[in-house]
Amino acid sequence: MAELTSVERVMRVLRNEEPDRIPHFEWIIDHRVREAIIPGCSMEEFTVRMGLDAILTGPDFRKQQIDEQRYRNEWGVVSQYTAEEHSVPLEAPIQTLDDLEHYTPPDPHAPGRYASLDRLVKKYKGKLAIGVHLNDVFSIPRYLIGYEGLLMALAADKELVRKLVAMSVEVNMEMAREVARRGADFVFTGDDYASTTGPLMSPATFRELFAEPLKRVVTEFKQQGLAVIKHTDGNIMALVDMILDSGIDCLDPIDPVAGMDIERMKRDYGGRVALKGNVDCAHTLTFGNEEDTVRETKEVIRKAAHGGGLILSSSNSIHSSVKPGNYLAMWNAIRMYG
């Protein structure tokens, strides 16, 4: 097979086809890991210099600084900076249906909303696959009423959940129309539905409140010409058929800590969906050595690469505790054996 460009390679996998080699990219590579490998480089420069196959961005939301550690974003959520790549949400703007009735989400069409995407498209369109982080049905409600608030509302205030989910779907469909028009190749959604032991809600509740809205938003993404990678950690086996019925193109990360088996997923679902994952970032990449990492990377290839439809990556992200040498060992093994 002739050598493909990175965008051709990724998009071929997202069509569940076989590429020239297995593509690789990560949602997050912590700045401390990057610094150990290529000192002083941004994530964009790291992506290019390491030959990763996709470059990622998201809509640009303004932040209002409250103090040295805290800020309020356009969604009204107060968060705190940490030493990690992600901040921690502290305060949610909605508690009741009345709060929601008086709430206005960020304008999907606001000037400057897609400045980061526009810049990447200008530089990398046709070379790297360009992915944009949007949401589907769970994360926005969770941010707006808080984690505990959402879990309580699943039992006590389903009408509030329905309206939050509907708002999330509408806003993200509008943003998808914008990012498609501006040249994005795929969207990835990071809404986690499960813990390591199982879903955060019963399958019946997921079917009642989330399944149809998920299908609606994924359908709109795809009607705009965007491939869809769905991320959810945890043991999602009780929900997996409903997730796949939404029409996603790729499922990530097949969480090994939660007992998710990529060999089983390839066998049982590989005809329906591509897979992304799943070298263990909680154990192997963090506490193992380079030999362990190479061995596990080769195992993922053996279990899930046949016939195509695999993006090989960590089982979540390259977080701050990942050993830089282990990330490089995985990177090298993908190129040598993939």
Image: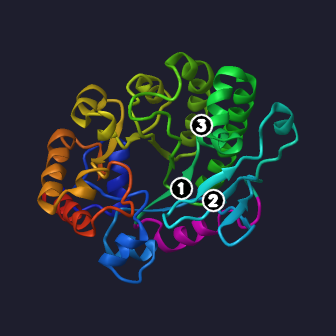
Q: Amino acid at mark 1?
A: Val
Q: Is residue 251 above or below residue 327?
A: above
Question: Disc 2 marks which amino acid?
Answer: Pro
What's the residue type where badge 3 is placed? Phe
In the rendered structure, find residue 259 and report the number of the disc placed on it. none
Query: Is the residue marked by circle 1 packed among few (<14), some (14-19), or many (20+) residues within 10 Å?
Result: many
In the rendered image, is residue 338 in sight?
A: no
| Quadrant where the C terminus is found in the figure | bottom left
Query: Which stretch is magenta?
Result: 110-127
Residue 8 belongs to the span the image colors magenta: no
| Residue positioned 56% across, 25% down in the render | 211
**Could you tell whether 175 is left or right of 222 in the image?**
right
**Helix, strand, or loop for circle 1?**
strand
Question: 161 and 107: which one is in front?
Answer: 161
How far apart marks 1 and 3 lie (CA) works out to: 17 Å
Q: Which residue is mark 1?
A: 132
Residue, disc 2: 59
Q: Are marks 2 and 1 in contact (CB under 8 Å)?
A: yes
Instruction: Report, in whole angstroms, how far the alpha carbon at label 2 lies from the one at label 1.
Output: 8 Å
The image's colour scheme reads: rainbow
Residue, disc 3 = 138
Q: Secondary structure at mark 3?
A: loop
Q: Earlier in the sequence, mark 3 or mark 2?
A: 2
Q: Percent from the top left, x then y, of residue 30?
A: 41, 66
What is the secondary structure assignment of the residue under circle 2?
A: loop
Q: Is residue 66 visible?
A: yes
